[in-house]
Amino acid sequence: QVQLVESGGGLVQPGGSLRLSCTTSGFTFSTYVMSWFRQAPGKERESVAISYLGGVVNYRDSVKGRFTISRDNFQNTLYLQMNTLKPEDTAVYYCNAKAFGKPELWGQGTLVTVSS
């Protein structure tokens, strides 16, 4: 059974940090491009960070220098370290897995609220 389970969300003050985790099972994690997406209230879901095979990563401009995506192919887990959080980072954060010829996979999301 395929599972992607996000954790680590919560309420944090502006300037604070959070570390999100996406624990997966049921598919060959190391062969998938793994990403974090987010969706703020009333807005479309957007890509935040991507971890390609071979170690290449990419970020949306608004989080560059503040967020770091990483993956553990032995623990089948994806991470997102988020530093210097801003109110505009408030959103539900989703874990995503893609591989050529395979169905796209999504987690259920974890809520991050940045507020004083």
Image (cartoon, rainbow, N blue to C red):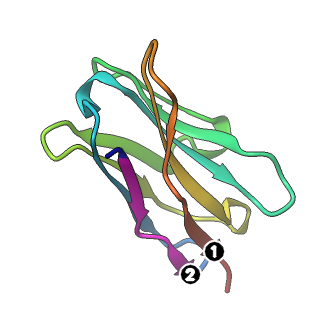
- According to the image, label 1 marks what residue? 113
- Residue occupying the point 36% across, 50% down: 3
Horizontal side of 30 relative to 51 (left or right) equals left
78 in relation to 55, above or below: below
Near mark 2 (Cα within 10 A), the count class, few <14, some 14-19 or many ≥20, is: some
Q: Which residues are magenta?
A: 3-11
Task: Find the residue positioned furthest to the front.
Answer: 1
Decide whether the magenta segment is chiefly helix, strand or loop.
strand
Quadrant location of the C terminus in the rendered image: bottom right
Secondary element at tag 1: strand
**Mark 2 belongs to which amino acid?**
Leu
Residue 40 position within the rendered picture, expressed as x and y whole percent measured from the top left: 75, 59
Is the residue 37 above or below the residue 92 in the image?
above
Rendered residue at 49%/71% (across/down): 9
- Magenta-colored stretch includes residue 8: yes
The image quadrant that residue 33 belongs to is: top left
How far from the left and from the top, in percent, is residue 69? 40, 42
- Residue topped by disc 2: 11
Q: Are marks 1 and 2 in contact (CB under 8 Å)?
A: yes
Q: Going from the N terminus, do you reach mark 1 or mark 2 first? A: 2
Question: Which residue does the image show at 63% across and 74% down from the upper left?
Answer: 113
Query: For residue 22, which numbered disc appears in the image?
Result: none
Disc 1 to disc 2, how far (Cα)? 5 Å
